[in-house]
Amino acid sequence: MNIRRGRNRSIRIALTASAAALSLGVLSACGGAESGGSADGKLAVTASFYPLEFLAEQIGGDHVDVTTLTGPGVEPHDLDITPRQTGRMSEADVLLYLRGLQPAVDKAVDQAGVQNTVDAADLTTLEAHGSSSGDGHDHGEEEGHDHAEEEGDGHDHGDSGLDPHVWLDPVKYAELADGVGEVLQKADPEHAADYRKNAEALTGKLKKLDQNYRDGLKNTDTRTFITTHAAFGYLAERYGLDQESIAGVDPESEPSPARMKELQKIAAEEKVTTVFFETLASDRTAKVLAEDTGLRTGVLDPLEGITDKSQGDDYLEVMEANLAALQKALGAK
């Protein structure tokens, strides 16, 4: 069952501490930067992984010091936090994370009992896409599909099979941007006008990105694409595509022989040309499937981190590169 929640509820949860000070635990992880209260008077923001780091930097601008728990090249799903690191939590002003994506971060946050954390899953709605067993069907709706109203108010998306990859839908990512902007404004009222302006500028860029995807994928030879893991369910739903994944939402799950055989059949029936792999996970199964079916391989980046192998320097550039890769694979006209 899908669990949906609205942005208003999330802001109430994120800002329940006293107005005097926001005390947050800052997690220190292998590969991530050390962080604490900013020594230069800036708002100290800790983000669990790249998409939230990008939001904080873009919206916070010169008024924030942003650190991330997941260093470049580290697969976020695999991030490990030791008890000692959890115990070294220190003060920060804002902590951004996404429950359900990184179990180690979820556990550390829960154990620490810190207040005023911002769960990005509360700033939008989560849905179920694909499965962890590897039979990752995700048939998109018609182009321009609008998401339904909230159907529930629970908070167990980490264990419910809901897809955490909301940032790959520019529309939903803009909802996260709005929420982060409001949180920063409340945490640092002195610079609220700047945060509001920066958030509006970013959502404007995301609106343009959304239009580029709508225009660029409007007319294609096929609507089906194959990826290593089911990270692109929200993107597929938004633009009327069919995602077929080798693995499920977990990039490390192994596909069954039956699933590989099924994908070979789908590739033939749906005129699939390319099997996509990603930069932070193994490309082994993608290459095996491509060899068995005579298909090409290509990169479709789930944007869980930026490295020197990324097809761009930031979220917007990599998303444009993803669009170009999809257009080529799907036979866009």
Image (cartoon, rainbow, N blue to C red):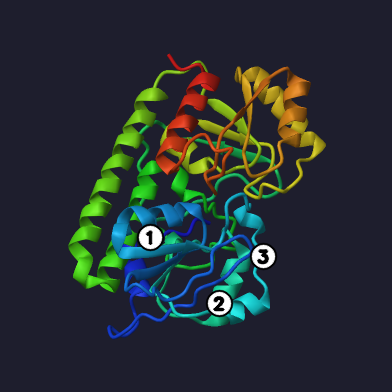
Query: Label 1 belongs to which residue?
Result: 123
Residue that appears at 60% across and 42% down: 230
> Do residues under tags 1 and 3 come within 8 Å of each other at their CB atoms?
no
Determine the secondary structure under disc 2: helix
Residue that appears at 57% across and 59% down: 70
Determine the secondary structure under disc 1: helix
Q: Is residue 211 left or right of residue 47?
A: left
Q: Residue furthest right?
A: 257
Amino acid at dot 3: Asp
Query: Label 2 belongs to which residue?
Result: 110
User: Residue 180 appears at what percent x and percent y?
Assistant: 34, 61
Q: Is residue 147 visible from the viewing direction of this image?
A: no
Residue that appears at 59% across and 31% down: 299
Q: Is residue 140 visible from the viewing direction of this image?
A: yes
Q: Residues within 10 Å of mark 2 (few under 14, many from 20)?
A: few
- Rounded to the nearest angstrom, the CA distance separating label 2 from label 1 is 19 Å
Determine the secondary structure under disc 3: loop
Mark number displayed over residue 212? none
User: Residue 325 appears at what percent x and percent y?
Assistant: 52, 26
- Rounded to the nearest angstrom, the CA distance separating label 1 from label 3 is 25 Å
Amino acid at dot 2: Asp
Q: Give the quadrant of the C terminus.
A: top left
> Do residues under tags 2 and 1 come within 8 Å of each other at their CB atoms?
no
Amino acid at dot 1: Leu
Residue that appears at 46% across and 75% down: 36
Q: Residues within 10 Å of mark 1 (few under 14, many from 20)?
A: many
Query: Label 3 belongs to which residue?
Result: 80
220, above or below 20, in the image: above
